[in-house]
Amino acid sequence: MSYGNSLFSELLYSADEDSNYPGEVEAPDLMQYLPDYYKDVREMEKLQETIGLEIGGLKVGTIDVLDQAFVETATVSLGRWEAELGLNIDSSKSYATRREMIKAKLRGNGTTTPEMIQRTASAFSGGVVEVKEVPDEYRFEIHFVSTLGIPPNMAGLIQIIEEIKPAHLAYEFVFSYTWWDSVKALTWESAHSKTWNELRTYR
């Protein structure tokens, strides 16, 4: 089964900007809650500043703990999600890639149907996906309708499809690209500044 001459890694159009740091700590000004005679007392100001930083850190930590309960915002807990779903834990992958795998696996539970495969593929493409059955040939086609080009993390999608599809069925992907008529609106100067892959996915 082939998916074109371009390597999947060359066509990535998303980047993961997440970090392990949950957010900036905003320390509340505790001096405003104290009587006026504490103002300009250096020791008290320093004490309240330190306590404020601790309170701010607790607030950020609380939000981060809640974030770990949801796939869309999880970071350090992604390994737990992967372990529960039987996925390989690879911390070298971006958070976005790992979340796609988790969401696809969650959507792929139960009896395999075209709708299940459609939901699974949508988790990777982030757009509209259609699944067309070809029963006479014992295969089905996955059409990426609203996403131009090859979606990122195709290797992950293939892995999930292989796990959930019936063993006797073959499948193939159908990608969408820019029509030449859409590119005609570009001037030569604008088109010349773009790469071939950018023109193939130009809207």
Image (cartoon, rainbow, N blue to C red):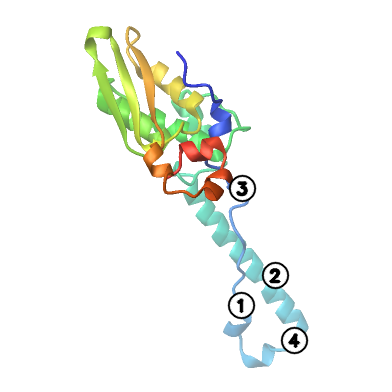
| Proximity of marks 4 and 2: CB atoms separated by less than 8 Å | no
Label 2, label 3: how far apart the Cα atoms are:
25 Å
Label 1, label 3: how far apart the Cα atoms are:
27 Å
Residues packed near mark 2 inside 10 Å, few (<14), some (14 to 19) or many (20 plus): some
Q: Residue at x 56, y 25 (%)?
A: 7
Label 4, label 3: how far apart the Cα atoms are:
38 Å
Residue 31's x, y, as percent?
Answer: 63, 82
- Residue receiving disc 3: 19
Q: Residue at x 53, y 42 (%)?
A: 14
Residue 183 appearing in the image = yes
User: Which quarter shows the C terminus?
Assistant: top left
Which is in the foreground here, disc 4 or disc 3?
Answer: 3
Label 1, label 4: how far apart the Cα atoms are:
15 Å
Q: Residue at x 53, y 49 (%)?
A: 190
Q: Residue furthest bottom?
A: 37
* 78 shown above or below 60: above
Viewer-side residue, 91 vs 63:
91
Of the residues shown, which amino acid type is indicated by label 3?
Ser
User: Which quarter shows the N terminus?
Assistant: top left
Q: Earlier in the sequence, mark 2 or mark 3?
A: 3
- Left or right: 164 in relation to 93: left
Which is in the foreground here, disc 1 or disc 2?
Answer: 1
Residues packed near mark 1 inside 10 Å, few (<14), some (14 to 19) or many (20 plus): few
Q: Earlier in the sequence, mark 1 or mark 4?
A: 1
- Residue receiving disc 1: 29
- Residue receiving disc 2: 50
Q: Earlier in the sequence, mark 1 or mark 2?
A: 1
Of the residues shown, which amino acid type is indicated by label 4?
Val
